[in-house]
Image: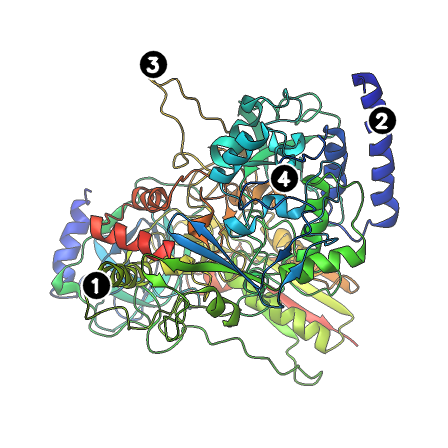
Amino acid sequence: MTRIRWQVFTTLLVAWAGAGFGTCHAQEVAGHVPEQIRQAQQAPSSPGSSEPSATAWWLPGDGKTLAALAPYRDAFGSVGVLNAQGPVATAGHPFFEPIGRNGRACVTCHQPANGMSVSVEMIRRRWEETQGQDPLFAAVDGMDCPNLPPADPKSHSLLLERGLFRIFLPWPPKAADGSDLEPEFTLEVVRDPTGCNTHPEYGLRSANPMVSVYRRPRPVANLKYVTHQGFGVFAFIGKNGLPASRDPETGSPSGMNLLSDARQPTLKTQAVEAAVTHLQFDGKLDEPRLQRIVDFESQVYVAQIRHAAGNLMEEGGPPGLGVRNVAAGREGLLGNNITNFVIPLGDQWKHLPESDDRNRMRESIARGHDVFMFRTFWIRDAMHLNTVGLGNPTKRTCATCHGMHMMGMDVANGWMDIGTTNLPWAREEPLNPWNSNKTRLPLFKITCKPGVPPHPFLGRVFYTQDPGRGLISGKCNDVGTIVMQQLRGLAARAPYFANGSAASLREVVDFYDRRFNIGYTDQEREDLINFLSAL
Amino acid sequence: MRLPLATLAALFIAGTAVGAGPATGERVSFVSCPIVRDTSTVPCWLAEYQGVLYFLTLQTDVSAPVNPPWLGHKVLVEGVVSGDADICGGRVLEPVALSVMQELDGSCNTLLPAEERYNLTFEPPRPPGPSRGRLAFGDPAPRAAATPGSALREFTLQYEFDGMVAFRHAQTLQKILEAARATHATGIRITGFRSASRLSNGSVMRERESIARERAEQIRTLLRGAGLDGLRYTVQVKDLSKRPNGGDDAARRRAEVSLEGP
């Protein structure tokens, strides 16, 4: 298809799709989605590949059965994927079938072998096996920008280097009903290494103005915890008093913990958007398929099951470890206390009689748990943490923020800024004549408008690689705040943080050590890493 | 870290005897940098004014009636000098209202190390890490539905100086929402107030002119956003900034919400 014919075709598609959302589904999708579908349909799509899969790679449309308990090797042992409702026949299942234009399925970026996310190691392997032809590398979000040359690794640098997918969102932001939101800040592109934010078709000054940021896929597992209606879920957000987003079907408030910017309230609304933006499905998924996706997602659990510490599912083992315990646990509980605990381990691993490698690892995990729960440090200048009544600084522990029982994410409305995307803490390449590497992420200058209080810790003007929640709420103090993730299946899905800036669990721990001047000893660091790797 | 000479003197004196400064029961209002003092348990929050060190509050959790201020910002302190024994070397203010000043101030950066002589003489409401023994918050339990006759119909939201809705208001807004539904309210009357604070040095700090209306309209917007969009809203404003008295100035920074009908 020539470029001109393609443009005509996409224009017609855009017109049709826009009409579909505008007339039939205006109340059923979030306000920003109609703009997203226009860009998704505008981006080229590549056909699916028939290349043979890697051992653990799940191809869209494979038609295999996903076992009730499927173990996959990872860097620290094995991660387990548990289907609580039994084996899943994937033939014809909308989570596993390519339902959009680009040959992807949900499973493409939510691989069982990677704890229902996708690791950068797997992405690189997939690139080598298919010479970049796998639908995983679809231009719409698997490229740094859809206009770049296909099959060139440079066009996919963020995906191949950090496992990042492009998230494109309308700017200025849209309210839930699709109306314009007046943001409290201006956003200026000061660095655009991918070219997408300044691109005439895809960027902020295009006919359909979009901001592009780059984020990791979140694990589609353990979602009864992520979507709970228990502790802390109210009509008003406990962090700022503003109304929580609501389930459009029931009107119930959402815990707003699904996506890194909390832009979708439910699994169903998330699936609608993901089909549009990631699969290039051109419309709104029908109710039966949506329900099947939600039903599958609501019964799948992930946790580490084998480790140098041995079988994490053994009878009588720690109640917070292993995927069966995760599936059986109670959702909606605060675990930042010694009644529930975040990850209940019990005492059986604290002082073991035999001093073999397995028991030494068990003791290390138990110590790492105590570092996580009880090792205090000064948490300072973290938006939506120090500002919610704890004071700045506050002498607390990891479990203060990572407080959800069994998951280690925030119990509700979990966005905060610890500095993963906002400067001066976000990871940037050192600039000097001896380093040829450049930071591949965009950089935005944020200016809080007059009449709005300055950001409490960054002032009126500051810089960010990803405005996070601020792109949805338009609030100055939300810029750079990111909904924290669950801590399950970590060993299977590096890199970490929403922008993939930590390549390993050690880099995660080092980030916190540097950010909050914790001063971990080598022993504390090693124990904490071992603990995290066993979740 | 460098401390002003006055602060060092106050720390020394306050550790041994109290006598200087305002008498018990006297009101003090001032703007100052907060000071954090670590202890073997939770940190204390202090502020110094005219050579006297005051204890403001302890670190507890989000449910505390008084929340600690922020380093990096000055704080407006409005309190009454208590006759209680000093805490962390500071004279106790009880009650006390704290308002974090919005503009950043890098000079507010004093974090003092723990010293044996400033250990707390009581067990704090919760330790610095996970809550112990009791839960700071209980497990979620189903609440009994409010009946029309029992539900409150008047609510007050208190603000920090120049402040708008924040984390501490979520519970009150939730109560308004639930009461409006339980009573089948047909209207909501919202009155936003503007206030001022008379400081101990005689000067007056006034909230920004438009804040009374901003407060009232924000509440209307939030209630509508949470689902109360079919009701009749009446918004009014009151300016109480003309005559601050150094007494109940903090209490005047408020909004009142009344449910109407049926």
Indicate the secondary structure of the residue bearing disc 1: loop
Tag nearer the camera, 4 or 3: 3
Q: In what element is the residue under mark 3?
A: loop
The CA span between labels 2 and 1 is: 73 Å
What's the coloring here?
Answer: rainbow
Out of B84 and A504, give the one closest to the viewer.
A504
Q: CA distance from mark 1 to mark 4?
A: 43 Å
C-alpha gap between disc 2 and disc 3: 47 Å
The circle drawn on residue A9 is: 2
Q: Nearer the viewer, residue B191 or A212?
A: A212
User: Which amino acid type corresponds to the residue marked 3 in the rendered image?
Assistant: Pro
Check if mark 2's residue and mark 4's residue have beta carbons within 8 Å.
no
Q: Nearer the viewer, mark 1 or mark 4?
A: 4
Q: State which tag comes first along the sequence, 4 or 3.
A: 4
Q: Quadrant of the N terminus of chain A?
A: top right
Q: Chain of mark 4?
A: A
Q: Earlier along the polypeptide chain: callout 2 or callout 4?
A: 2
The residue identified by callout 3 is: A433
Q: Residues within 10 Å of mark 3 (few under 14, many from 20)?
A: few
Disc 4 and disc 3: Cα gap in Å? 39 Å
Q: Are marks 4 and 3 in contact (CB under 8 Å)?
A: no
| Quadrant assignment, res A369 | bottom left
Q: Kindly identify the amino acid type of the residue bearing the numbered disc 1.
A: Cys
Write down the residue under mark 4.
A183
Relative to A185, A99 lies left or right: right
Q: Position of residue A149 (x, y in %)?
A: 63, 19
- Of circles 3 and 1, the one toward us is 3
Q: Nearer the viewer, mark 2 or mark 3?
A: 2
Q: Residue at x 30, y 68 (%)?
A: B127
Give the residue at mark 1: B88
Amino acid bearing label 4: Pro
